[in-house]
Image: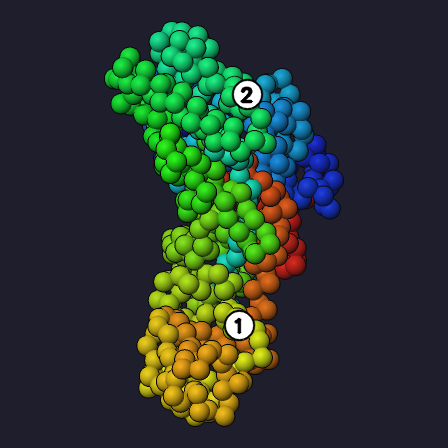
Amino acid sequence: MGVPRWRPGSEISKREAFLLKRMVRTKKLFRLLREHRLELFDDAFQDELAEMYRDTGEGKVPAPPAMLAVAVLLQAYTGCSDAEAVENAVADARWRMVLGVLDDEETGPPFSQGTLQRFRERLIAHDMDRRLLERTVEFAKEVGGFDHRKLPKTVRLAVDSRPLEGAGRVEDTFNLLGHAARKVLRVAAALAERAPEELAHAIGAPALAASSVKRGLDIDWNDPEQKADAIKVLVKQIDRLEAWVAEHLSAAAEGPPLSQMLATIARLREQDLEPDPDGGGPRVRPAVAPERQISVADPDMRHGRKSKSKTIKGYKSHLGADLDTGLIVACAITPANRPEAEALPEIVQDLSRYSERNGVGELHIDRGYVASDLVRQLHADDVPILSRPWRAPAGELFTKRDFKLHLGHRTITCPAGHTEKIAFGTTTRFPAERCDSCPLRAQCTDAARGKGRSVSIAQDEPLQKQLRTQIATSDGRERLRERVHIEHRISHHARRQGTRARYRGIRNNTFDARRHAATLNLEHTQLAMQRAQLPMAA
């Protein structure tokens, strides 16, 4: 049983022409997809989509994967759920027109919720969501108003990020442990063919059977002493549950899902609890663990910061765009506590998959990405890096800019003319006897007598010096302003996708970022075609 090819008609019917005229100003992506659907989903790309399916000769004939891919794009464009997508495929003439079923009035929906969900899982499993994004870039080259003969052979890549609030519920230590333990209780009770409440009371863990663990513990949560005792009570009840599982369900506990749930409890204990120095059991750890899990429902979520004043509970969403075409070429999702620099290699790796213009000719980034080893590598390969340098501390004293760095000789000279040797990634200290007798001492350092001025030399000091020189000129600042295009892309992406994650987990949210980026690329292509005054279908 082969995978069916999507073969919607190419000729525009009278009813479709009527609908298309109503999409000149609004919902224009429906118009583009109807007019160019078979160019976007050509035979070669449909063959790639078909490779996600095994031909076993059994089961139902799958819906054409290209049609389901169109539905995935329309979901992102309209912001609808799977259930709403199924209804739209029946009741919305615009959806039916694009899907090629407008004239099939007597038929039901062309796909079900389950079909759409399984297709999404296939896209993720085979990394075809990335390929879908790549295909929109290829499509733009084929039909858009971009004169690629005038484009450089390499990509002027701009990268930026934004906060993405996680979909999982953020919980404190009591609720994290209680939530994880309740999941173990439910699975254990089902395996033992007992009710969770009955099992909880039988093993002496009644708090785990309550609607919430804090309700089950039933204390005055404003009393520190009662809270300290409550964590000990909760841990004892969890211990009893784990002991019962080990005794009665030892074989099941070695495999999923129980093994994963028990591992989650162990991880939460380690990150949030420590021995009480006064004895008597554990206490809540006063310090926050560096990689603290904040949600049981979505274990990939983390606490983080976009800035000193803006916190994030979830993820950071990163986009990479080609400044010459305005197209988004790569997406990445990282936990909110990870630095921006960790996402850059993934963005550049995705870019390298393109058959043409696959090298980075220029890199336009925010200073958060500068710490990446990849940036230093590109700089060593003479790739221009466009970014603001790290800020020098504000104040009335001399800053690093007032010192003369000679990187070739590996020396630094202070404003008074004294020279010292430097090493990258270290701190250079000027002799105290020189600084104490220097007439410029009051302008240079406020250290006590007997201590000289020190200057930190960054590991990427050659790059930082170049960035400082760049921002000091009008032409350099003008080039830095070119990255405003990625900021616009980020803004449009956030407006379309929203500020809260639709799914749980890094990989699922990467899929969501890519499909929204694909719709933005198609809209951008449509604008480019209009500006180039390319002929549109009737």
- Quadrant for residue 488, please give it: bottom right
Q: Nearer the viewer, residue 531 or 369?
A: 369
Q: Quadrant of residue 123?
A: top left
Q: Position of residue 489 (x, y in %)?
A: 59, 54
Q: Residue furthest front?
A: 278
Q: Quadrant of the C terminus?
A: top right
Q: List x then y, in percent, for residue 316.
A: 51, 48
- Identify which residue, 286 or 104, lies in the foreground: 286
Marks 1 and 2 sit apart, C-alpha to C-alpha, by 51 Å
Residue at horizontal 47%, vertical 31%?
A: 228
As helix, strand or loop, the secondary structure at mark 1 comes to loop
- Which three-letter amino acid code belongs to the residue tagged 1? Pro
Q: Residues within 10 Å of mark 1 (few under 14, many from 20)?
A: few
Query: How is the rendered protein coloured?
Result: rainbow
Residue 89 versus residue 454 in the image, above or below: above
Q: Is residue 480 left or right of residue 154?
A: right
Q: Mark 1 — residue?
A: 393
Residue in the image at 53% along x and 43% along y: 313
Q: On the image, numbered disc 2 is attached to which residue?
A: 218
| On-image quarter of the N terminus | top left
Residue 15 can be seen in this image: yes
Q: The residue under label 2 is which amino acid type?
A: Asp
Asked whether 431 or 459 is in front, the reply is 431
- Would you say residue 1 is visible in this rendering? no
Count of numbered tags: 2
